[in-house]
Image: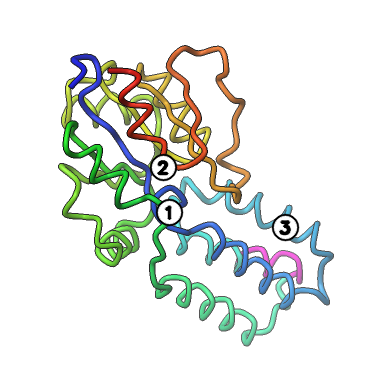
Amino acid sequence: MHSQLTTIGFDADDTLWHNERFFQLTQDYFAELLADHAERGHLMDRLLAAEKRNIRHYGYGIKGFTLSMIETAIEVTEDRVPASVIRQLIDAGQEMLAHPIELLPHARSAIETVAATHRVVLITKGDLIDQERKLAQSGLGELFDAVEIVSEKTAATYHSVFAQHGDGPQSAMMVGNSMRSDVVAPIQAGCWGVYVPHGLVWEVERAEVPDDNPRYRALNDLGELAGLIQTLS
């Protein structure tokens, strides 16, 4: 094992299993419910603004998203949204929370292969109960040496996690689909940042690609991860 790379961190949502597509489907439903009150583009802008505004209150995840939909519905209808619509939005959120987990290609094999030679840590953000549920349903939990469910992924977060569960950020790699949270922030901490595209990306997670940074890498899918790690060893 390469002395300078001892610990591999994995993101969860849309890296190991599907997540964003359920938000997209619920947004479509939301737009249908409010079609008589707001044009879709305007409604989505208002919803995104509410989500960004509410992260500091509710954090990331389905519960905050559901509350942001309700808040947006109240705003665009000028407090006249029917209680039946509020109920439908609550039901939609609860349906999201109960949705079964579907692993992405190569997720299990990538973790198993890497775990044979490196420490592997799951680093995810969102609602604690929901993330624990998804991890349990995924069947991947036993593969990780540690699991960290955090409120935000910043350079300071990665410094702390990889100091506790590894040999510090300089000896760590983070793998994920969010350019902002899983690539840029880890690189700022001194880690390797490996981007694995998913296709659907929440606007909040977009960031400039750090092409000029020597610790940035991009893969087509998780099936290429073991080969990348070998080239760095």
Instruction: Give amino acid for label 2.
Output: Leu
**Residue visible at 18% across and 34% down?**
119
Quarter of the rendering containing residue 225 = top left
Instruction: Give amino acid for label 3.
Output: Met
- Say whether residue 148 is left or right of residue 37: left
**Residue visible at 58% across and 52% down?**
51
What's the magenta region? 71-78
Quarter of the rendering containing residue 87 = bottom right
Residue 44 is tagged as: 3
- Say whether residue 31 is left or right of residue 67: right
User: Where 79 falls versus 64 (above or below)?
Assistant: below
Instruction: Give amino acid for label 1.
Output: Pro
- Label located before the other in sequence (2 or 1): 1
The quadrant of the rendering that contains the N terminus is top left
Residue 155 is tagged as: none
Quarter of the rendering containing residue 78 = bottom right
- Label located before the other in sequence (3 or 1): 3
Q: Would you name the residue on which mark 2 appears?
A: 222
Neighbours of disc 3 within 10 Å: few (<14), some (14-19), many (20+): some
In space, the residues marked 2 and 3 are separated at their CA atoms by: 31 Å
Residue 49, given in percent of the width and then of the height, sits at 66, 49
- 127 in the magenta segment: no
Say which of 135 and 38 sits in front. Answer: 135
Residue 91, given in percent of the width and then of the height, sits at 51, 81
Say which of 131 and 170 sits in front. Answer: 170
Q: Secondary structure at mark 3?
A: helix
User: Where 207 falls versus 125 (above or below)?
Assistant: above
- Label located before the other in sequence (2 or 3): 3
